[in-house]
Image (spheres, helix red, strand yellow):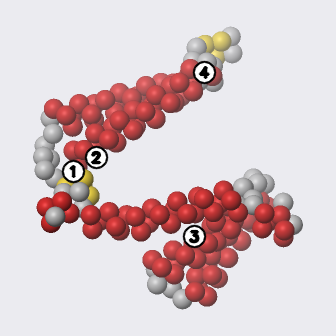
């Protein structure tokens, strides 16, 4: 059991998984660009021309990383993530997932305020009223910058509707 906790995830495995994921992202970029057009028109390059080649570069870089991990690996046996570190990572990852779900259901401003308040209280050890004031201040600043300053509406939920913020 102690050996399992020591080697939860190896660095080699993580490099291979990352290479495959970035190659998949490169493929998605290439496919989307291809659908937009990757050729030249009378006006110059079509919309997908440059993104397509960026996707190709991402795929090539990912393949080099994958081949290096498979055949020329120098960090054999090096641990990337232990169970103890995984708990710490989940302490940040799970609140981010909650932030995304809350933002989709209740709006970005409510999600941001709850995330900042929760992170400050549970991970930073701040008193609830300090965390709440900071969360409201940051959320208010986001509203001023995006909605008023840049005139870019962010995702709003039912609470903003009840308050007449639209």
Q: In this view, does 19 lie to the left or right of 95?
A: left
**Residue at the image position 58 percent from the left and 58 percent from the top:** 100
Mark identifier at residue 35: 4
The Cα–Cα distance between marks 4 and 2, rounded to whole angstroms, is: 32 Å
- What crowding class fits label 2: few (fewer than 14 Cα within 10 Å), some (14-19), or many (20 or more)? some
Give the SS element for disc 1. strand
Counting residues from the start of the chain, the first of labels 3 and 4 encountered is 4
Q: Say above or below: 152 vs 125.
A: above
**Residue at the image position 65 percent from the left and 12 percent from the top:** 41
Counting residues from the start of the chain, the first of labels 1 and 4 encountered is 1
**Residue at the image position 46 percent from the left and 84 percent from the top:** 125
Residues at circles 1 and 4 in contact by the CB criterion of under 8 Å:
no
Read off the residue under disc 2. 14
Give the SS element for disc 3. helix
* Near-viewer residue (62 or 84): 84
Residues at circles 1 and 3 in contact by the CB criterion of under 8 Å:
no
Read off the residue under disc 3. 115
Q: Say above or below: 4 vs 110.
A: above
The image quarter containing residue 90 is: bottom left
Q: Where residue 58 sits: x, y (%)?
A: 41, 32
């Amino acid at each position: 059991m102690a050996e399992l906790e020591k080697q939860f995830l190896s660095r080699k495995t993580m490099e291979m998984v990352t290479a495959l994921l970035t190659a998949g992202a490169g493929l998605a970029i290439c496919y989307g660009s291809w659908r937009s057009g990757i050729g030249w028109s009378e006006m110059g390059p079509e919309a997908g021309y440059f993104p397509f080649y960026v996707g190709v570069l991402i795929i090539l870089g990912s393949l080099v990383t994958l081949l290096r991990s498979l055949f020329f690996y120098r960090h054999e046996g090096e641990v990337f993530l232990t169970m103890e570190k995984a708990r710490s990572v989940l302490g940040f990852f799970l609140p981010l997932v909650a932030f995304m779900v809350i933002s989709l259901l209740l709006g970005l401003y409510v999600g941001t305020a709850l995330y900042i308040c929760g992170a400050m209280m549970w991970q930073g050890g701040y008193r609830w009223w300090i965390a709440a004031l900071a969360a409201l201040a940051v959320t208010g600043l986001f509203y001023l910058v995006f909605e008023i300053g840049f005139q870019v509406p962010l995702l709003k939920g039912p609470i903003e509707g009840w308050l007449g913020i639209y």
